[in-house]
Amino acid sequence: MLNLNAISQVNEKKVISAIKANEHPKIDAVLDDPVWQNATIAKDFIQHEPYNGKYPSYPTEVRMVYDNHAIYFGVILYDSNPDSILQELSLRDKFDEANADLFAIVINPFDDGFNGVEFLVSAAGVQSDAKHIGEEGDSNWDAVWESAVKITEQGWVVEYKIPYSSLRFPNTPVQTWGINFFRNIRRYREWSSWNYVDNNAQEIISQSGQLADIKDIEPPLRLSVTPYISSYLENNENGNWSNNFNAGMDLKWGINQSFTLDMILIPDFGQVQSDDEILNLTPYEIMYDEKRAFFTEGTELFNKAGIFYSRRIGGRPKFKSALDDVLDSTEIIIENPVETKLLNATKVSGRTNRGLGIGFFNAMTSAVDGIIQDTLTNVKRRYQTQGFTNYNMIVLDQSLKNNSYVSLVNTNVLYDSENYIANVTGTEALIKNKENTYQLFARGTLSQIYTDSSTFGHAYFLQFAKIKGQFLFELNHNTESDTYDPNDFGYLQSNNESSWSTEIEYNVNKPFWRVLNWQNELEILYKNLYQPRKFTDFNINLTTQTTFAKKYLTTRLTMGFYPVETHDYYETRVYDFDWMFKRPRYGFTEGMISTDYRKTFAIDIVPGAWKAFDYDRYGYWLFLSPRIRFSDKWMFIYTLGFDNNYNTFGHVDHYENTDGSKSIFFGKRDQLTISNTLNTNYIFNNKSSLGLRLRHYWSRVEYDDYYQLLKSGYLTDAIDFDIYGKQFDTNYNAFTIDLQYLWRFAPGSELSIVWKNSINYERDIIINNFWNNLEHTLGYEQVNSISLKFLYYLDYQYLKRK
């Protein structure tokens, strides 16, 4: 039970006064500088996990001072067993993958309870930083700051220097910042914080304390450039080698104390990790993660209204597939680029003293041509698959009281030579009550496409939710009209949908018996078409998850039930919403076991199975991921994905008859998918590392019989197999290697050497044996790239002081 002192700390917001220093400390994790003698001290931390509200196992003291250039922190993390402090190394910003003690500072310079930045250091000296908006965290945000770590007889010490150029704050004579400090004692899996954080509440920033009496500091001129040079040696699928040289730079300029311009000129993303490509048998586009740093860092404002998908920029040409439609009978495609070339991109973002966030984004890509050749005359011609394209986005986001906000967003895409403009306007609002226990969320968007004719569409989403306490719930309604299309700049899997859903949660975060925490969730979903109003889907899902105290073993069980037939209007591929395919009633169950990651060996196991109730259709899957920590420098993670489905049905072909009627054909198929992924990193120190990621994905699809779809949504009896033969059978492989050496030789500066290997192998001949299939894949045409990239961070304030 809490004593009276602890109860007092829980109920009140802590405030600490800042002290301005005449000289700055040396960042060496030795707190013997004179400035630390009179520094204010934040102490008396309170547990966040696992025993929320109790005192932590060991005390922590945070000293802080500031001057005209930076704010400094000297932290003593007491530990009676310093030889037990975990110090596994990790990559920068990958603290969650390391078995190490941690300390983090979360600063909210505008003290609005909603926006914050985090600076985290592990006991191994590895830095991580992130930007927070509400309950969302973005670890792709990177700042340049200094830290040092030292293990001592008392525990460990970490010292920080955070320059004002890494922060945005108001230009006022006296300031009060929101602030909180967090400590993780990894061997106990214990998190504690300076200001109490209720783990029944979803947001962290709103539960910060305050750093008061910051006086007479001025936002500095924030100006930095990061020029780069890179060189590539590459071979294509034909085995021909080529080389190229690139140069460009990233410019960051603080327009004023609140707003920053970030521009990338002649970008080079050739070293970005390979995508995890898969065989797509669905009617929907696959959404891949964004891995290019410029498009992941500082984009939180641009995610408002859900209409920004940065992979559109420099992605697949809009009219790439049209090349097949313009071929004459004697022509073939010689070249059809899979991506457009990004020329430059600019973003401006920030927030005024009154809480108005403003964001502007612009990017330009050059025109792309496919090349067609006549096989009789050998004459070549070009066909433009996407002209010069300009992408624009503007965001206005006003913070309101009680950690609420309202936003207005507009995106615009102009295809220069196609007489095509796509415009999407959206707004969203989040309103919370004073206690932050309930919220109302609303979002509305309007799409407008201007070509020879104009098309307008709309979408909206409404939610009422209880967000604090053991018992939580959500009531949701979503609608997307049949003409809504944000996909020139955004991503929408499918439109013409309307849904109602509810989620009910009951969570026990206070340890009891042998259990640390227990979460339960019930979700019910009902869907129909927007136009015409036709039923599509109804399902119920139940999940329960438990983490046990003794060995930190986590288990999860999920069960799902589709009690009525699903009416699938998209699998038909005709999109007139007159034809549908009726999927049978089915149920599924999935389990999960995750062992303690603190151990040398840990493993995640996720088995599952599904079964249709009306037909002999079923499947099962297994996800297996063992991890071995050989030392504090070397971690190995292997992931196996196994998915086997029998007697499923899917579209294979359709055409329009002379009388205007449609003929749609389905195939009955068995699909086996096996993926193997190996991740290993050897971390030399907190500045250099060698990483290897190897992935092989194999999906084998074999058709048994073919059927014609009826207007009722059911299938005919099997038709003559010889009509289609075996042409729809698929044996697909994707094999990639990403090997990277990275040396962060100075703050913000890097040298990287990368080897990438890629094989995409697809045939209509089934190979049943895994090893024979792998042998065929490795013997197929492949693409190799060896690259060297050097980038150097230059900061105006640093150069000025020198």
Image (cartoon, rainbow, N blue to C red):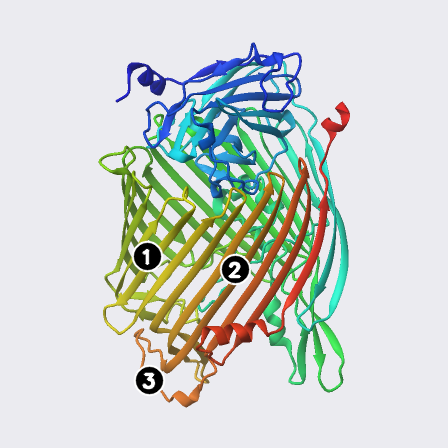
Q: Is 443 placed left or right of 690 in the picture?
A: left
Neighbourhood count class around disc 1 (C-alpha, 10 Å): few under 14, some 14–19, many 20 upward: many
Q: Quadrant of residue 140?
A: top right
Which residue is at the front of the view, 63 or 382? Answer: 63
Res 578 label: none
Neighbourhood count class around disc 3 (C-alpha, 10 Å): few under 14, some 14–19, many 20 upward: some
Q: Secondary structure at mark 3?
A: loop
In this figure, which residue is indicated by the disc labeled 3? 718
In this figure, which residue is indicated by the disc labeled 2? 276
| Mark earlier in primary sequence (1, 3) | 1
* x then y, percent, for residue 32: 60, 15
The kind of residue tagged 3 is Ala
Gap in Å between the C-alphas at discs 2 and 3? 36 Å
Q: Name which residue lies at 47% across and 58% down.
A: 483
Image height check: is 10 above or below 610? above
Mark 1 vs mark 3, foreground winner is: 3
